[in-house]
Image (spheres, grey):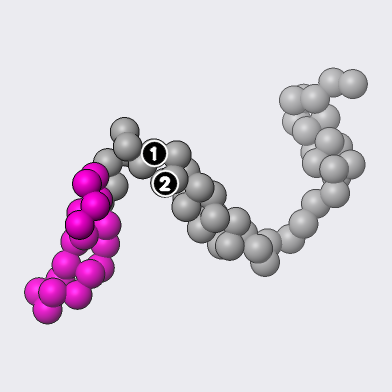
Amino acid sequence: MMEGISFVTNIRGRKVGVLLDLDKYGEIWEDIYDSITARERAHEPKSTLEEVKARLRRRGKLND
């Protein structure tokens, strides 16, 4: 067993979750989280940089 990592098990002993010591593994968790987020957003509509800039200008968040 690795220090700073604990598994959560169900009644049958099957691993269903994990607890990470974020002081020790915080950077790794950020990478995992970013990867999950990217996969979830993979099929979302894409915007060009110009479309994003135009949207920000309309909202008054970008002046150039």
Q: Which amino acid type is marked by label 2?
A: Trp
Where does the C terminus fall, quadrant-wise? Answer: top right
Occupied quadrant, residue 56:
top right
What amino acid is found at the position of numbered circle 1 in the picture? Gly
Of the pair 11 and 62, the residue shown nearer to us: 11
* Residue that protrudes farthest toward the top in the picture: 63
Q: Residue at x 54, y 55 (%)?
A: 35
Q: SS for tag 1? A: helix
Above/below status of 64 relative to 22: above
Looking at the rendered structure, which numbered label has been put on residue 14?
none
Would you say 25 lies left or right of 10 here? right
Question: How far across and how far down the image is residue 4, in percent?
Answer: 24, 45
At which x and y percent is residue 33? 47, 50
Characterize the local packing of mark 2: few (<14), some (14-19) or many (20 or more) Cα atoms within 10 angstroms: some
- Confirm or deny contact between disc 1 and disc 2 (CB under 8 A): yes
Q: Residues within 10 Å of mark 1 (few under 14, many from 20)?
A: few
Q: Magenta residues?
A: 1-18
Q: Which residue is mark 2?
A: 29
Instruction: From the viewer's perspective, tell me whether residue 28 is left or right of residue 38.
Output: left
Q: Residue furthest left?
A: 11
Q: CA gap, disc 1 to disc 2? A: 5 Å
- Give the residue at x 31% y 33%: 23
Does any portion of residue 38 appear in the rendered image? yes
Q: Residue at x 84, y 36 (%)?
A: 53
Q: Position of residue 11 (x, y in %)?
A: 9, 74
Q: Which mark is residue 26?
A: 1
Left or right of residue 61: residue 42: left
Regarding residue 58, the answer to whether it shows in the image is no
